[in-house]
Image (tube, helix red, strand yellow):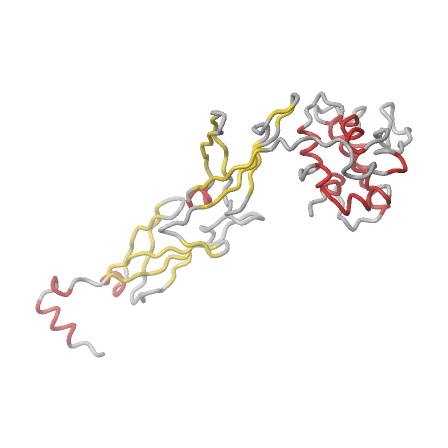
Amino acid sequence: MSKSLYETLGVSENATPEEIKKAYRKLARKYHPDINKSPDAQEKFKEINAAYEVLSDPEKKAKYDQFGDQMFGGQSFSDFAHSQGADVDLEEILRAMFGGGGFSGGFSSGGFGGARSSGFGGASGFGGGFGGYRMPDLDLRTSITVPFITSVLGGKHHITLDNGESFDIKIPAGIKTGKTLRVRGKGKSYQGHRGDLLITVNVAPSPEYERRGDDLYKTINIPLKTALFGGKIEVETPEKKVTLKVPKNTKNGQKFRLKEKGFPKAGGGRGDLYLVANIILPDVDSLSDDLKECLQKLPE
């Protein structure tokens, strides 16, 4: 179950009250509108206060730990807050959702001396959890299939919605089947608000490559002469064509490793590309009689 209020304060779900308080005070100082003049500081400050109002109160925290982000329609709290629009009073929306007098935050707008209000409905906590006002789900959901090579290198994919709206989306390198991409502001509209488009990605199979974890495997054809006596062949990789040096006495199924030429890793870097040798035998009928005779004299 997703619990994004902890992420808002940058703490784990097992954080102690003291750790939560310390993280809150640090972030509140950083984003306080009297100090931070960046355009999004005020909205970030509101989110930080809201998270602390919940996580600093044992009763409210217990309810949030039970239901998580279901209380925000399944969105993260940050996404929920942003979806309301810049000019919307987030405090008023939370008051409507959970009941009570809203929140004012641990730092007043006049400096750092303000007192924290009871928040989210005072002693009643969340006002019964799901009993109050709830914004309708404005998100649209769809799925797409992207070529395998796009999953490796990244790229663009064209989307056309049922309403006729058409646009390109960016596909990040390293995407895997089942990953969901969010396109903000392309969902359903309601009372001046618009949800997001959630896209589930499927990766098409490749006739050329096989992915095993972060490594890619590709079968390459090598003429018998090159396999026996060595040589060089050109091989297409996802990024570019490379020249592979084939040693003499190469065996069928032998693997050649191209380091960090495979699938992008989640934490950075890439896996490896393995080229698997497939030795191509010549048509016996195309061989000269002398060569046939020599081959027939080879030991079993």
- The residue lying at 37 percent from left, 55 percent from top is 218
- The residue lying at 70 percent from left, 34 percent from top is 78
Front position in the image: 162 or 61: 162
Locate residue 84: give its quadrant.
Answer: top right
Vertical position of residue 239 compared to residue 291: above or below: above
Front position in the image: 5 or 241: 5
- The residue lying at 56 percent from left, 48 percent from top is 266
Front position in the image: 133 or 198: 133
Q: Residue furthest front?
A: 131
- The residue lying at 49 percent from left, 29 percent from top is 161
Locate residue 284: give its quadrant.
Answer: bottom left
Q: Is residue 2 left or right of residue 175?
A: right
**Residue 100 x/y as whole percent:** 85, 30
Q: Is residue 295 left or right of residue 47?
A: left
**Residue 204 x/y as whole percent:** 42, 46
Front position in the image: 100 or 265: 100
**Residue 244 x/y as whole percent:** 34, 54
Locate residue 147: give its quadrant.
Answer: top left
Q: Is residue 76 left or right of residue 231?
A: right
